[in-house]
Amino acid sequence: MASSTATQFSLSLSAKHAAPTTPSKLPTRVSSLQKPNLVPAHFGLRCSHTQSVPLSKSRICASSAQVMDPVTSKNEPTIVDVDLGNRSYPIYIGSALLHKPELLQRHVHGKRVLVVTNNTVAPLYLDKVIDALTKGNPNVSVESVILPDGEQYKDMDTLMKVFDKAIESRLDRRSTFVALGGGVIGDMCGYAAASFLRGVNFIQIPTTVMAQVDSSVGGKTGINHRLGKNLIGAFYQPQCVLIDTDTLNTLPDRELASGFAEVIKYGLIRDAEFFEWQEKNMQALMARDPAALAYAIKRSCENKAEVVSLDEKESGMRATLNLGHTFGHAIETGVGYGQWLHGEAVAAGTVMAVDMSYRLGWIDDSIVKRVGDILKQAKLPTTPPEIMTVDMFKSVMAVDKKVADGLLRLILLKGPLGNCVFTGDYDRKALDDTLHAFCKS
């Protein structure tokens, strides 16, 4: 794609698909999602169910059916498939999945496992994961490495602790790494798995909203550099993603809200009806209503899985998942990793991207207001920290991964809600005006 050309995207899950207005009225059967004329009739579909656990399949394909089941019963995990040919994998979503050892064990192909986690999550879930990996499976041995918790530790020094443990434990190429934690752990464990012995299998067990709805899906792995976020890494897909929604019971309120920034993003860029559902149900999400959370996680994963299946290596469409991230990553880098949570920075960055879209005349003011309102409902920031200056933004954004041939490409909204562009073809004055509007200097 030429860097000067705007590419517009509006590939929502369903143009006519009616989302439930309240969590209590969610349907209980999974059916196909309608998206006529956009994808092949069997896009993302696996026809056979696994025998050992009842599974409700999420089928992302063109169909006349308009019913979507966001949740299933406690005993039936839902599956959303990421369709990447022979590297396809399932996302399991449900309650008490850590008590279903067969889900994890079917994806462990050797006898050695290394669980990578942090000092916050380990006391809560490490023993449960080890039990799930070994129950009725005495031939599997499990090692673990416990890293310090926080974005500020997503660096090469901390990554080396994973390699140290793997090498000291004499793990081989049939080993499996398991990421148990939030986005930082998932990114680092995945990158370690991609690099160790030039690649070993790994599994994602995300324990935050942020990781469950976004970072655990799609194979983006990596670490930060002091000059920019996620500049070192690889695309490397997991064997599966296991989302036990019960792990959100121990998630701090600030982390919970942070994850909703990514949920809101899906509605803005490609799923307007999902955004409308969020506007009606944000209070339920903030109150940790199980049905609302399950629906938001499933719908987010469906959106992410579909985009990844169409554009795994981010040549165009997948870049749209970074709405607000160019501004947000600049905030995270500028204030110091870990000072603002990723979702907090993305929320402020989304407001800035929406502001710039409005200045360009690409959206109307009603969308600007709705974005501000829903982020405030989610108790997320709508302005960058005062320490950020125009020069700080420009310096960090200049090394953003979406820069091509020296041109900064951005994800901006254009047209009705649910439509966006990934483009370097915009009036530079609009960017300058947005930066000056949100920065004191």
Image (spheres, rainbow, N blue to C red):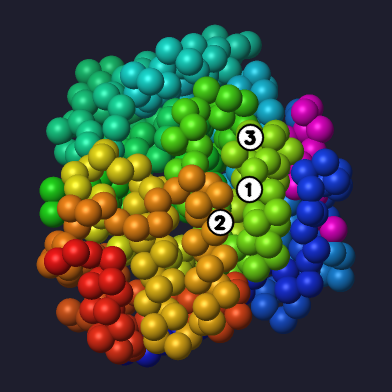
The residue lying at 19 percent from left, 48 percent from top is: 335
Q: Is residue 84 above or below residue 255?
A: below
Within the image, what quadrant is residue 388 found in? Answer: bottom left
Whether pointer 2 and pointer 1 mark residues with C-beta atoms closer than 8 Å, the reply is: yes
Q: In the image, what residue type sits under mark 3?
A: Ala
Camera-nearest residue between 420 and 158 = 420
Q: In the image, what residue type sits under mark 1?
A: Met
Residue 240 point in image, percent of width and height:
55, 40
Report the disc number at residue 287.
3
The residue lying at 63 percent from left, 34 percent from top is: 288
Left or right of 300 on screen, residue 294: right
Distance of label 1 from label 3 (alpha carbons): 8 Å
Report the disc number at residue 282.
1
Camera-nearest residue between 304 and 367 = 367
Report the disc number at residue 374.
2
Distance of label 2 from label 3 (alpha carbons): 15 Å
Mark closest to the chain's N terminus, 2 or 1: 1
Badge 3: few (under 14), some or many (20 or more) residues near its Cα, within 10 Å?
A: few
Badge 2: few (under 14), some or many (20 or more) residues near its Cα, within 10 Å?
A: some
Residue 36 visible within the image: yes
Left or right of 79 on screen, residue 343: left
The residue lying at 44 percent from left, 71 percent from top is: 354
Magenta segment range? 67-77
Whether pointer 1 and pointer 3 mark residues with C-beta atoms closer than 8 Å, the reply is: no
Q: Secondary structure at mark 3?
A: loop
Residue located farthest toward the front when viewing the structure as drawn:
440
The residue lying at 26 percent from left, 52 percent from top is: 385
